[in-house]
Amino acid sequence: MTSRSRPLFPVGLVTVGAVSFTVFAWASAFVSIRSAGAAYSPGALALGRLLAASLMLSVLLLVRRQGLPPRAAWRGILLSGVVWFCGYTVALNWGERLVDAGTASLLVNTGPILMALLAARFLGEALPPRLLAGMAVSFAGAVVVGLSMSSGDGGSTSVLGVGLCLLAAVAYATGVIAQKPALSHGTPLQITAFSCLTGTVACLPFSGRLLTELPGAPLSATLNMVYLGVVPTALAFTAWTYALARMPAGKLGATTYAVPAVVVLLSWALLGEVPAWLTLLGGLLCLAGVAVSRYVPRSRHRVADHAPGAGPVPVPAHVPSHERQSS
């Protein structure tokens, strides 16, 4: 047996599979939340989901024989665990009780723009004019979504749902920015697992509600809650970090723009709900703004690729040192 055995499948094919799995898993989460949310309150559903995810991630840690992350990683772990895994999950669960799954996914996918703003403020990254233009387009889309859903009876409730989904987007962006420095010190599995465990602890105040609602909940709702923890949280985040170590972060981030389209198809097929045309238009504006902010002209790539004396492709700062050496 050789020291380096040939992989069963090409690495590129596995990476594409990991990305595709992540997109569909994250899209399915919006539909499962709508289903489980009919029986579980937002906090109880968040706790149940994170308990299932923590159990799955703990098993993966044991199988991979990865222990505690370094001390330098814990600041990002704690912040992302409280804000992203706990805060995002509760806000999204609550928001999806008031808006449909497709609209929720469209609003949450304004997160990349918010990430760029936070990265410019706290990580010193550039804030180019194209990003500002994309922010303006996405903000206009969010206004259209809010106006379209606030018309008619119960308009204030719909506005609250839109606001909660946007709050979830803020929590999502904040969590990613907090995790980025932590990934320089620990493995993706370590950072994800201990962030999830932190979020679970933060959701423990909802344990009473979970214990009260669990006996009366239908089996389908409970299975959806477990599914949310195992697939979109534990497995999808693991697949995401696997792909992140093997392809540029910007290119990988662009794949999440497919999530809302998949959500609309899944919510139509499984829940029978499709956003109204004006709501869909506003959501498309949100995504168009994100696309504008992240677009890089092809000519710039060509200049960089063919520049004489160009060095190796830089490894993102959040890739741990042991993965830098292998990339």
Image (spheres, rainbow, N blue to C red):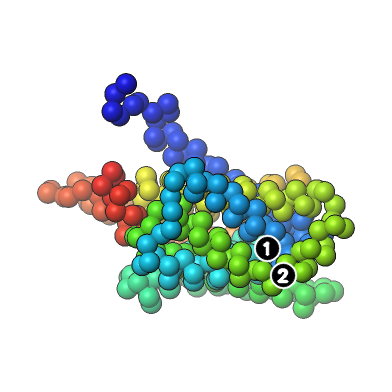
Residue 253 at x, y percent in the picture: 45, 54
Residue 2 appears left or right of 263: left
Could you tell me which residue is drawn at 29 percent across and 23 percent down?
Answer: 2
Q: CA distance from mark 1 to mark 2?
A: 7 Å
Total label count? 2
Q: Quadrant of the N terminus?
A: top left
What residue is pinned by disc 1? 47
Q: Is residue 21 visible?
A: yes
Q: In the rendered structure, which amino acid carries the disc numbered 2?
A: Phe
**Nearer to me, 184 or 248:** 184
Residue 181 at x, y percent in the picture: 37, 65
Identify the element where label 2 is drawn. helix
Q: Is residue 183 visible?
A: no
Q: Quadrant of the C terminus?
A: top left
Of label 1 and label 2, which has the lower sequence position?
1
Question: Is 92 rendered above or below residue 121?
Answer: above
* Residue 193: numbered disc: none
Q: Report the residue that reaches farthest toward the top.
A: 1
Hey, which quadrant is residue 165 in on the image?
bottom right
**Mark 2 crowd level (few <14, some 14–19, many ≥20, 10 Å Cα):** some
Residue 20 at x, y percent in the picture: 53, 42
Could you tell me which residue is drawn at 76 percent across and 64 percent down?
Answer: 210
Hey, which quadrant is residue 45 in on the image?
bottom right
Asked whether the beta carbons under mark 1 and mark 2 sit within 8 Å of each other, the answer is yes
Q: Report the residue that reaches farthest toward the right.
A: 216
Question: Is 104 rendered above or below residue 232?
Answer: below
Identify the element where label 1 is drawn. helix
What residue is pinned by disc 2? 206
**Nearer to me, 243 or 136:** 243
Q: In the rendered structure, which amino acid carries the disc numbered 1?
A: Leu
Could you tell me which residue is drawn at 12 percent across and 48 percent down?
Answer: 308
**Mark 1 crowd level (few <14, some 14–19, many ≥20, 10 Å Cα):** many
